[in-house]
Image (cartoon, rainbow, N blue to C red):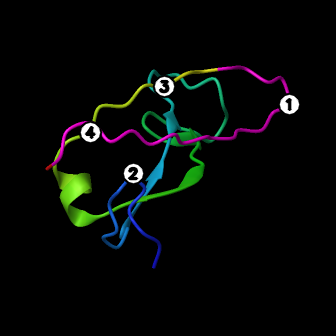
Amino acid sequence: MPDCSIPGCKDPGKHRLGVRCRVWQEPSPVEGKHRTDALWAPDTDAFLCDAHAMGGMDMTLLIEPNGRGSNSIRVIGGSGSDI
């Protein structure tokens, strides 16, 4: 099991981070997809321990279109305040 992705935390990372883009309004522009269905949902290689997963998180999302029809996620962990 990987360590938690929060810098300095060596607890086991039991919870995987991911990002999901959902259909939010109907009618959906994508055939077969309904409201709240995922258009895409890649997982990251980042994991959180129980304490950090449940303790609250501030996240910043930087979106960069790539025109390739694929998605990638980069995770950069900051320490913030200790739990």
Mark closest to the chain's N terminus, 3 or 2: 2
Label 4 or label 1, whichever lies nearer to me, is 4
Q: Position of residue 3 (x, y in %)?
A: 42, 69
Residue labelled with disc 4 = 57
- Above or below residue 42? Residue 30 is above
Label 1 is placed on what type of residue?
Arg
Pointer 2 residue: 7
Per the image, the residue denoted by label 3 is 61
Q: Residue furthest right?
A: 68
The local secondary structure at tag 2 comes to: loop
Question: The residue under label 3 is which amino acid type?
Answer: Leu
Look at the numbered disc 4 and give the secondary structure of its residue: loop
**44 vs 83, nearest the viewer:** 83
In the picture of the structure, the residue carrying the numbered disc 1 is: 68
Hey, which quadrant is residue 64 in on the image? top right
Q: Separation of disc 2 and disc 4 at Cα?
A: 14 Å
**CA separation in Å, label 4 and label 1:** 30 Å
Mark 3 lies on a secondary structure that is: loop
Q: Nearer the viewer, residue 7 or 12?
A: 7
The quadrant in which the N terminus is found is: bottom left
Residue 54 screen position, x and y as percent: 18, 53
Magenta segment: 64-82
Label 1, secondary structure: give it: loop
